Amino acid sequence: MANTVASLTVESLIANGFTDLYCLPGVQNDPFFNALYDRRDAVAPIQTRHEQGAAYMALGAALATGEPQAFCVVPGPGLLNTAAALSTAYATNAPVLGLVSEIATASIGQGYGALHELPDQFGVLQRLTRHAERISDGAGAPAVLQRAMTALRSGRRGPVGVEVPTDIWNATVESAPGDLVAPVRPGPEPDQAAVVEAAQLMAVAERPMIVVGGGAQECSEHVTRLAERLSAPVVAFRSGRGVVSSDHPLSITTPTAYQLWPRVDVVIGLGTRMAMQQSTWGVDDDLKVVHIDIDADEIGRFGPPTVGIHADLADALPLLADALGTTQAERSEWRAELEIVRADAEAATAAALAPQYGWLGAIRAELPPEGIFVDEMTQCGYVSWLGFDVYRPRTFLSAGYQGTLGYGFATALGAAHARRDVPVLSIVGDGGALFTINELATAVYHRIPLTTIVFNDHAYGNVRRIQRERFDGRVIASDLTSPDFVKLADSFGVRGMRASTPDELRPCLREALSSDEPTVIEVPFGEVPFPWPHIMRPRIRGQQPDG
């Protein structure tokens, strides 16, 4: 029976489907881990070497599975060490539960200088999550935990925080509910009139386009059917990659979408802000905008849509399909134009960024279609947004708009731990790698079969390149001395390899991806073409915004 807050928390994790806990124990959460000891057969503790590693692993596991994942750390510096991972979970709609201990109740806010004390730690937690709670006593603990678990699975996903003062872990819970499974709040009811209006716009559109984001990851089949019905190309930038498979004739990347954009007459945004299209590429009065999102605040963030539908895509898209009817505008010319533009745009981008495409092509040739690719803030990572084929939902993991340098290795480690049924590959630069490469120790201890490619140019390469390109070559604070990553891997007991060309990389990947152990492959990396002109394109439609 769960008779303390600590044991209730453990039982709540179990009841709500958590099987792993990424963690770093410490004095303020010792009572919780003591309670976990007797239930570690149901919830396995995955201890890491740094709190950021624990939170990033939970992030990667959540992104790779779509299911809530949890981490547990001590207060103060423990929480602050997870801040980058929590902010990335916020940006990527990842359902991550942070269990964070706190100093003793009587000391909170007193400024006594207690171990790990922060001014207003709960305020910090609130600002890093979509929902935060504090357990203040045993009596209120069941309701707090239930609200947190409900928040993880309801509405727009994102990180949830639960703070527990160290003296509250052992507080008595007098009456816990027999069923600890938290209910899921139903999504907003789609406005039927708005659905009909949107369907009418789509039916008469001659040149429609669909833009998908992370909010569409669970609706691949619905989105694909809608695209086929409308003969509408589907574009995703980062978080929406894989919603429609890259081998589908209607799947396009942003270089193709950019060239088509001035001709689009109806754009349909599904689970995305459409920031690139609306804010950067531009809109005008000839473009009709249909925007469907579970978060009402995102609808019209860059201007009022022609039709906005506040709903879960899983609820709205079947209704939209029913409302579309059988009569559609003639779109054979649009399909023909799509094929011509795509061939030209993809060829031009591949030629302009040939070195990066060469490395990515080698990776794609060896990584199975169901394999998971984790990007990073590195030259090949940026180009992967444009030129890496993705065939399944949740197989392209990205930091999204947060652009979190250094997130990649530990996040990929969490994905590889949670998805041992598929190969997982991480690409990092030498700069970002050293943020969390210490978690190689975690990979070894828990035998996590992650393959990591380190592109080593002995620099914060993107920073250095921008300094050269945009600041007259005034390079400052961007050159690095990086280790021999093969020797570094060996020091952890990890297999290390080196490849100097894409052709050399392929057999290394073949061996690594078939293994059940972690592998690090170092790639010496030199100057490559600047990718950003191909990513951040100038306004192509409508007037320049004021200011």
Image: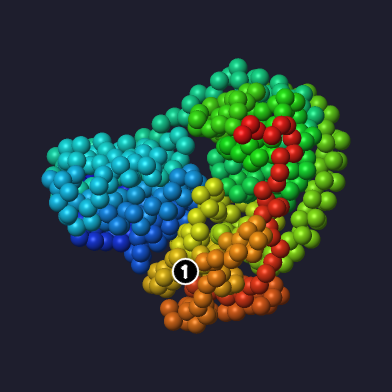
Between 283 and 14, the one nearer to me in the picture: 283
Q: Disc count in the image?
A: 1
- Tag 1: Cα neighbours inside 10 Å, few (<14), some, or many (≥20)? some
- Towards the viewer: 23 or 482: 482
Q: Residue 403, can we see it?
A: yes
- Locate residue 364, reporting x and y percent: 67, 63
Residue at 59% across, 54% down: 396
Q: Residue 111 versus residue 50: which sits nearer the camera?
A: 111
Q: Position of residue 174 (x, y in %)?
A: 14, 39
Q: What residue sits 34% from the left and 41% below the top?
A: 126
Query: Quarter-wise, where is residue 21 in the image?
Result: bottom left
- Considering only vertical position in the picture, is 428 above or below 106? below
Residue 163 appears in the figure: no
- Which residue is rendered at x = 60% and y = 72% of the image? 457
* Residue type beneath disc 1: Leu
Name the residue furthest top: 193
Image x and y of residue 304, in percent: 60, 25
Find disc 1 in the rendering and name its residue.
434
Looking at the image, residue 54 lies above or below residue 278: below
Residue 86, above or below 279: below
Image position of 195 (left or right of 2): right
Relative side of 183 to 11, left or right: right
Quadrant for the C terminus, please: top right
SS under mark 1: helix
